[in-house]
Each structure stands twice: as structure tokens, then as C-alpha cells.
Image (cartoon, rainbow, N blue to C red):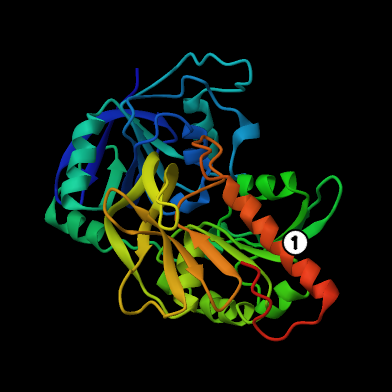
Amino acid sequence: MAGARYLTLENGRVFQGKAFGAGGEVTAEIVFTTSMTGYLETLTDPSYYGQMVVQAFPLIGNYGVIPADFESGTPALKAYIVRSWCQDPSNFRSEEDLDTFLLSRGIVGLYGIDTRELVQIIREYGVMNAIVADEPKADEASLAILRSYTVEHAVNSVSCEFPLLEWSAGVKRTVALWDFGAKRNIARELVKRGCNVVSMPARATAQEILTQQPDGIMLSNGPGDPAENTGIIRELQKLCDSGIPIFGICLGHQLLALARGGSTKKLKYGHRGANQPVQEMMTKRVYITSQNHGYAVCLDETLPSNARASFINLNDGTCEGMEYTDIDAFSVQFHPEACGGPLDTRFLFDRFIERIDCCRTKQSAQPFGKGEPKCH
């Protein structure tokens, strides 16, 4: 029988649950996701670095653990909290159960608590720090230490260390994927569309990226506060002057806005789940999207005149996409590559490829100068 394990929030609230996965004590920022499926994507998404994740959906693990569906090689989250987990998964692709997976990866697990109440608390109080341990940690000294916890060095902790090349069948184009904690399905979607994908580490300079002679530049998702990545923002400003089409997703979207003079803000509890409605401003069409972020681009006077919001969130009106008129670049806050679905916005990869092909055609016809051509 599983032993008792406790979750203590920085506001002093304590939940008693049961232990599964790895043992030990772990402190992290606590967040929740509303996704009903795709828990393997959640467990292996590098954007959860430094966080413990609460699944709002009550039963997790029913289709087991399928390594082919992982979004990264190693989980980045620090703890995993569920109402109940399935001990006998049923899926012909499954290779192990959730408890075994967490134990082998050193991820602390907690189950048997009222996750609905926990999610309500986070929604009301906002994202906060928490600790999972074998005993409550609600004394004032422990809470003071808990409140001081911060996530540090997030992007460099989950980025690749060296340039990595993924080939596609029938090579047509090369895309530099600037890896801030990229989910594997971003590369898969590009490869499907006839691209060589060169993953570049977060610490790469603009010159190192341009040395790969990319036809397009993809800015990936990733964890942490976007404004902390000052070095990346400086190098991205240089890439914006290259004339190469740029497409940013999630953290990449935020970093691009910062590089163009915009600003970002931390949301009360973020958007995490696969049921987020967004509206495209130009067409007024609504899409259901998968999201995982705690920060948003500010739609205020910091936005330059050559930038406009292309998508907005219909729940809270926050920015979900940007279009730039002075450079060949666009970005979205949501995840068009979401492997657990929905698939509504995968057409954005096609738009990116169209821009790449447009620029390749113009380059072959006539040399272009700084910041040109603008194929959009």
C-alpha cells in the first residue's frame, strides 16, 4: 500500500495524498493543465521545467506509457499530481505503466487528493510555489523558504547542447530550429513538409545560426520568464535583419515580441490545456488550441507600429499571435504542432513553408537587401 505524501502550498494549505513514482522531497512552482488526453506530451514537454503539474482530469495513465509519443528524451517537470492513476493500462503500444515511468525518471508523484479543489485554489490565488514531502511543511520557517523559490536557468537547462540535424525524405529546404526547449513534434511537422531541420542550442549566436544557411528560422517553445533571456533577445534582433522568414511558437512568440520592442507579463495562472479558444483577427474564425504558458505579450503602447495582434484568446483577451509588417516574421502563443491535439492550426506550418518558398524564389531572381524580401 502506498505511503502518505503531503502537498504544502505557499499559502499554508496542506493536502494529504498517497505516494507513487519516485521518492524524495521536491519544491517547485505548481501549475495545472485541463487536458483530458495527451498526458505523455505533458510529462515530456520541456516547457514544464521547474514546475509541478496538476492534472485537472481525474483519471490519468489509462493508455500507458508510449516512448514514441514523447516530446523530449527526459521529463523536465519536478513532480506530477493526479486524482487517480490507472494501474492496468490498456493499449497495444504501451511499454510500461505511469508509476514505473515516474520512478525510473526520478519524478515525484502524488495521487489521491481532490485535484478539483486544488485547481480552484490556484485559479483564485494564482500560480504559487509548493512542496511535496513525506510530512507537512506548513510552519512559518518552511513557508518562508518555500515562497523564496524561483525557477532559474530554465531555457539553457532544456536546450540541446550542440547543433543537431534531422533529415527529411526528398530534401527541399533547411530550417534552423532555435531550441529553447523544443517539443519534438515541431521538427516532425517541418520534416513532413520537406524540410531539413537543424536544431540550434539556445546559446547559439545569430552568426552561428546563419552559418547553417537556413531558408527559414523556427523559434521554439520553452520554459521560464521570456524577459530573462536577454542574450537570446539581442541575437534575435540581429536575425530579424537577415531577411529570412521567422516563425515563433510559445516562448519563441514572446521572445520575438521582446526583440521588436514589445513587453511581456506574467499571467495569474496561465493557459495550460487543449481547449483554449482563439480568434484570428483577420478572418474572425475561431480555433481550439493547445497551450502551455504562464506569460503573455502585452497589447499596449510598448508594441511597435509595425506589429499587430493576429490572434486573441477569447477567454481573457490576451495576445495569441503577432504579425510583423517590417520583417518577414509571425508568431503564435499556442501550439499548432500539439501531438495530443487539437489539430485546428497545423495550417500555420504550411504558411511558414509558403513564406520560405516565396523568399527562395525571389532570392533566385534578384538579390535582396537588409530586411527584404517581405513575402507575406
The location of residue 362, given as percent across then percent down, is 78, 72
Question: Which residue is label 1 attached to?
Answer: 357
Q: Residue furthest front?
A: 283
Could one spot residue 153 in this view of the protein? no
Which residue is located at x 52 percent, y 20 percent? 63
Q: Residue furthest bottom?
A: 369
In the depicted structure, whether residue 15 falls above or below residue 284: above
Could one spot residue 262 in this view of the protein? yes
Which residue is located at x 46 percent, y 19 percent? 62
The location of residue 119, given as percent across then percent down, is 24, 39
In the depicted structure, whether residue 241 falls above or below residue 315: below
Q: Quadrant of residue 33?
A: top left
User: Which image quarter is the C terminus in?
Assistant: bottom right
Q: Quadrant of residue 300?
A: bottom left
Which residue is located at x 61 percent, y 71 percent? 328
The location of residue 188, given as percent across then percent down, is 68, 45
Type of residue at label 1? Asp
